[in-house]
Every structure is written in structure tokens, then in C-alpha cells.
Amino acid sequence: MAAPDTACATLTIDLDAIAANYRLLRDRLVPAACAAVVKADGYGLGAEAIAARLIGEGCRDFFVAQFEEAVSLRRSFNRSGLDAAIYVLNGLADGAERDYAESGITPVLNRLDEIDRWAAYGRTQQKELPAILHVDTGMSRLGLTPGEIPAALDPADRMQGIDLRYVMSHLACAGEPLHPMNEEQRRLFSEILQRFGGVPGSLANSSGIFLGPQFHFSMARPGAALYGMEPLESDSKQMQQVVNLQGKILQCRFIDTGQAVGYGATHRVQRPSRIATVGAGYADGIFRSLESRACGYIGDIRVPMVGRVSMDLVTFDVTDVPESECRPGCSIELIGPHRSIDDVAADAGTIGYEILTALGRRYRRNFSGDTTWKFT
Ligand SMILES: *Cc1c(COP(=O)(O)O)cnc(C)c1O
């Protein structure tokens, strides 16, 4: 007997769409390489399966934020006999040199003392250990300041023990192609890069790739666009949708004109209405700020979200939907072909990145597309 379907909502992540998005970015970047940013568990979608699939597409460079993320990705690669570089954006914690080296994890060096510790450890191993050097060209967040570059290069043997794979920086305004910061950062980065001789450079995130070839350098680091977010604020849809979230209707009821829905009784219906309750709420990443702005879809029919979002529940006005399509057990599309991540983000007053990384852990999750590389 089949197991009963107890899931309140199902999140499907389309690996074929991620692969197609990767190929689109990669083809645009030639001859530069295309890395993949899989920090925060692949923006909440599952770093292991995504990285494995992208290795199948030829990706050999993966960025995470934290060492622990890198370790679990390295373990999953080892289990499956895969290999690729894993870089930790947040740097090299004091005393962690040996852990990085022995796990085959490459730090992005953000400070002079990180350079010194990594170089010193390399010398004790009589090896050159791989690293990326991060220079700050305008984010004022991580990386050496331009003023620290001379100290990094002089004395010349300061980096002895390091195999410097890339010098990288990060754009602050890449999503706004006309912003003057883009060109300022690009120029400063080029100047700094020249001082490192022939070391390859990496500057562009997803949006940066679309600023033109002069922003590509030797490797780009897209994240968002892989996961279906549009890199440019225009109407053109370039990326394939990756996420599909279907909420299950738990109950449906008729209410009369003037009756209220949800906490605070903030929504009162203006006509006899039918209300469908779905089993997902703000604990699952359905933002409270979506109240009275968002909608879902049943088939092709738009159903407005009404009333406050509860922790585990959210309510829709399904008056316009045939009753047979909004019974308990029927699905409402919360994210999908009619509602992109960017649409949901706009309704919630935030960015797609926040919507993705907040997607709940309680959803039944599955991957669609070619999952040959999927881990068990
Ligand atoms: C997150 C991040 C990226 C990826 O940015 P997207 O906008 O998601 O493409 C690239 N580089 C750095 C340093 C990052 O922190």
C-alpha cells in the first residue's frame, strides 16, 4: 500500500533548468570560466545535488561562504568520486590552516594575516597551497583594501608557500548596468590585477556577466541566475525557472459578506466567498509581508492571498475557482510558471535571494530533471 500523502507543500527543484542556466552563462563567458556559487546550501535549494549536476556540465569551481559548508560538499564529492575546487568566501579562521589543507579546501584570503598564516603553513608543508586573494574595490566588506596591496606584494616572498590561483573582487551595483560604480570598480580591479603579474582575475557575479566581456576577466562567479533569478531589471526573461512550490489545500469553506479571515481580522470579504487554507506559513518562508499583496494559482486562475500569513497556514480567496479544483488535497501554485521567484520577492518587498534562502525545511523536497548525479 502506498504511504499516505502527509506533506503540506511540495518543493520541486528542476536540475535541468539549473543546468540550462549554467550553460547559458558559460557560453556567454567564453573564453572565461564559469564557477558556481553554492553558498547557503545552494541558495536554499540543495548544494550537493546542484554541484554534482554542474560538475556533469563541466563546472570545476564552487564557492561557499563557510568552512563547514565546504567540508560537507567535499565529503559528498568524495562519496561520489567527484572532484572540483571548493573555495570559502569568508576566509581562513585563525588556526584552521591545517583543516583547510587536509580537506582540500581553498580559502579566499581576505586579510593580510590570512595571507601570512596560509603562506607559513604552506612553507611548513614544503608546498604551495592554493588560494584566492580578495581585494575590496568598493563594497567595504571583505578583502584587502587597495592601500594594503603594496604590503601583500612586498616583500616578494610574503606569499611564498601560496599558489595564488585568482585575484577576485565583488561588484556592488552589478544589477544596475548604468551605475557608475561598475566602471569605477572594474578599472580599479584591473589596476590592482596588473600588479599581480599574470594571476587570473575574477570579478563578475550573475549580473556582472551581463555588463559585458570587459567584466569577465578569467572566471565569473554566478549564483542567483543559476537558480532562475533574472540578472537584469528588465522585462526580458533569460533564465529558466528552477523552483516550483505547490501548497496543499487542507480545508475550504464558504463565508458571508463581512466575515473576516485570519489573525487581526484584517481582511473582510466583500461578497459571499470561498476561502482555501494551505499548509504553509511564515515558518516555511511565506513572508508575512505578502499579506494582501500576493497571490497563488489554481491551474491558470489567479487566487488572491487574503488575511494575515500564520506560522503554518495561509489563506486564499478561491471564490472564482470551480469547486472541484479547490477541495482538500488540491494544490495551489505558490511559486512556479505563473509566479517566479522575482514576482514573489516583489510582492514581499524583498529580493529573490531572500525568498530562496528562506524556503522552508518542512516542505517535501524533490529534484526533477536528470538526477543521475544526485547523492543519496
Ligand atoms: C554571493 C556572491 C556571488 C554570487 O552572486 P549572485 O548575485 O548570486 O550571482 C559572487 N561573489 C561573491 C563574493 C558573493 O558573495
Image (spheres, rainbow, N blue to C red):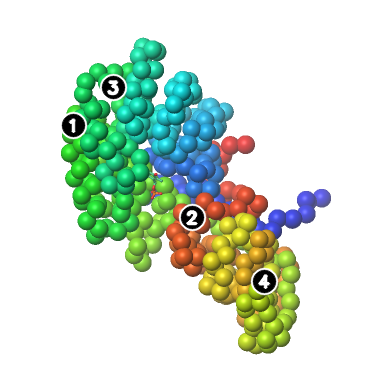
Residue type (three-letter) at the residue carrying disc 4? Tyr
Q: Which mark is residue 159?
A: 3
Left or right: 13, with 160 as reference point: right
Which callout, 4 or 2, points at the residue further toward the start of the chain?
A: 4
Asked whether the beta carbons under mark 4 and mark 1 sit within 8 Å of each other, the answer is no
Residue 294: x, y in percent?
A: 54, 70
The residue to which callout 1 is attached is 195
Q: Quadrant of residue 302?
A: bottom right
Does residue 118 sit above or below 136 in this rendering?
above
Nearer to me, 211 or 331: 211
**Quadrant showing the C terminus:** top right
In terms of sequence position, does the residue under pointer 2 or pointer 3 come before the other? 3
Residue 263 tag number: 4
- The amino acid at mark 2 is Glu
Q: Give the CA separation, mark 4 to mark 2.
A: 25 Å
Q: Which three-letter amino acid code belongs to the residue tagged 3?
A: Met
Q: Amino acid at mark 1?
A: Arg
Q: Helix, strand or loop at disc 4?
A: helix
Give the crowd class for mark 4: few <14, some 14-19, many >=20 residues within 10 Å. few
Distance from Cα at disc 4 to Cα at disc 3: 60 Å
State yes or no: discs 2 and 3 in contact (Cβ < 8 Å). Answer: no
Q: Residue furthest right?
A: 1
Say which residue label 2 marks. 354
Q: Is residue 131 left or right of residue 49?
A: left
Where residue 99 sits in the image (x, y, percent)?
A: 49, 23
Q: Residue at x 21, y 51 (%)?
A: 183
- Identity of the residue drawn at 32% across and 18% down: 161
- How far apart are the alpha carbons under marks 3 and 1? 14 Å
Nearer the observer, 53 or 362 = 362
